[in-house]
Image: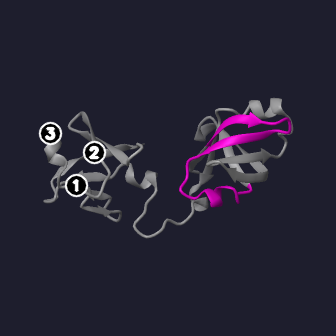
């Protein structure tokens, strides 16, 4: 089963086991409606935990998990990540994709000539940046409209005609 990161537990709050969660989602309202998450350090070391109460406040989620009833128990979850299955992912609006769909895409110029392959995405304050492997080198390309001519999910191809200017 493939799992997808959706949040990270930052710290406990209060004496009753509540935790503060950094949201890693474009759909915070879907996040707090979930009744369970896979919780662990990595996708290979998770346990399924039931949510008993959830709220959004100040750009973070605040969760209570079943069986976590004290500050001390909540402290043991700090640093753990929250994952969901692919079936639980919210449908994307038109012209939007998930990060895991971008990693591995081929980057080509306007003529279809291969430039490289996307290996990671960095969320920067102004816009995302694609990390692209090009002939053993790492190149960072801005994921902005001025550089991305088209995004073809079916063929797993990003057309960036200006990418050659960086070499």
Q: Residue at x 57, y 63 (%)?
A: 90
Count of numbered marks = 3
| Quadrant location of the C terminus in the rendered image | top left
Q: Residue at x 65, y 56 (%)?
A: 31
Mark 3 falls on what kind of element? loop
Extreme-front residue of the structure? 58
Query: In this view of the protein, which residue sits in the foreground, 80 or 31?
Result: 31
The residue where tag 2 is placed is 141
Cβ atoms under marks 1 and 2 closer than 8 Å:
yes
Q: Is residue 115 above or below residue 72?
A: below
The residue where tag 3 is placed is 167
| Residues drawn in magenta | 8-35
| Magenta-colored stretch includes residue 29 | yes
Mark 2 falls on what kind of element? strand
| Magenta-colored stretch includes residue 52 | no
Query: In this view of the protein, which residue sits in the foreground, 14 or 31?
Result: 14
Q: Residue at x 32, y 46 (%)?
A: 118
Residue 160 is marked as 1
Mark 1 falls on what kind of element? loop
């Amino acid at each position: 089963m493939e799992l997808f990161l959706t949040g990270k537990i930052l710290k406990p709050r209060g004496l009753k086991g509540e935790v503060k969660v950094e949201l890693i989602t474009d759909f915070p309202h879907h996040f707090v409606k979930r009744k369970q998450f896979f919780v662990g350090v990595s996708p290979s070391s998770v346990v399924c935990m039931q949510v008993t109460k959830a709220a959004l406040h100040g750009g973070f989620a605040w969760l209570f998990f079943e069986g976590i009833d004290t500050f001390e128990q909540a402290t043991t979850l700090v640093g753990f990540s929250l994952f969901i299955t692919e079936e639980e992912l919210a449908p994307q609006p038109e012209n939007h994709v998930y990060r895991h769909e971008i990693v591995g895409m081929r980057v080509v110029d306007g003529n279809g000539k291969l430039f490289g392959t996307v290996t990671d995405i960095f969320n920067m304050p102004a816009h995302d940046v694609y990390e692209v492997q090009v002939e053993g080198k790492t190149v960072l390309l801005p994921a902005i409209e001025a550089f991305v001519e088209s995004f073809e999910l079916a063929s797993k191809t990003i057309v960036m005609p200006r990418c050659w200017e960086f070499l």
